[in-house]
Every structure is written in C-alpha cells, then in structure tokens.
Amino acid sequence: MIKGVNKNIIEVLETDNPCFERAILFIRENLGKKEPAQLKEEAQAYLSGLKPRRKGYTKVRLGIAAIKLGSAAAVGAAITAALLKL
C-alpha cells in the first residue's frame, strides 16, 4: 500500500487483464484503518469483478433508430407522392 499526501492509495500490479498492467485505487478515509492485506484482497476481488462496458447500440437504441429511419422514409415517400400528383 502506498500512502499519498492526502489519500491512502493501493496499487494493484496484477490485474489479471490483458489490457491493463496495473490499477490504482483510492481508499475511502473511513476505511483506511483496515489491514493492508485485507485491502489488497478486496482490491483484487473488485478488479476481478469488473466487466468491460459494451459500446455501441443496445437493442432499445437500435429499435428507436429503426423507427426514426422508417418514419423518415415514410415522410419522404409521402412528400414525393404529393409532388408527383401536382
């Protein structure tokens, strides 16, 4: 455990993740009294439980995008039909 100027910090060197070689966690002031070994265990458990967030469209967003696209196509078709009748 590394002690900062104003904060207690724990640095995890083995993240078990191919993308990250280390992690730095800031310990809450009211929990800084725990044993360093216990804090390291909790840090490892926390990091192993993290999952990457998926970027991109979710099903709901994809559905909304499809409705918007369909509505725009319908409006465009209606305007085209109205102009062709003139």
Image (tube, rainbow, N blue to C red):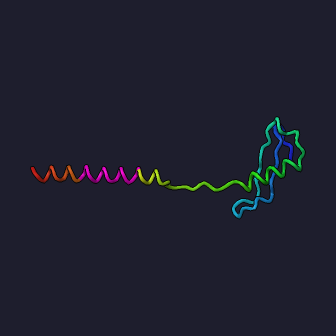
Does residue 52 appear left or right of residue 35 in this picture?
left
- The residue under the point 20% across, 49% down is 79
- Seen from the viewer's position, the closer of residues 26 and 54 is 54
- Seen from the viewer's position, the closer of residues 37 and 3 is 37
Residue with the most extreme left position: 86
- Residue 26, magenta (yes or no): no
Q: Which residues are magenta?
A: 64-76
- The residue under the point 76% across, 58% down is 15
Does residue 80 appear left or right of residue 14 in this picture?
left
Does residue 2 appear left or right of residue 16 in this picture?
right
Q: Is 78 drawn above or below residue 8 in the view shown? A: below
- The residue under the point 24% across, 52% down is 76
Splitting the image into 4 quarters, where does residue 49 fall?
bottom right
* Helix, strand or loop for the magenta stretch, by majority: helix
- Seen from the viewer's position, the closer of residues 39 and 3 is 39
- Residue 70, magenta (yes or no): yes
Location of residue 44 in the rendering, given as x and y in whole percent from the top left corner: 79, 54
Location of residue 27 in the rendering, given as x and y in whole percent from the top left corner: 80, 42
Splitting the image into 4 quarters, where does residue 3 fall?
top right
Residue with the most extreme top position: 30
Does residue 56 appear left or right of residue 8 in this picture?
left
Location of residue 33 in the rendering, given as x and y in whole percent from the top left corner: 88, 39
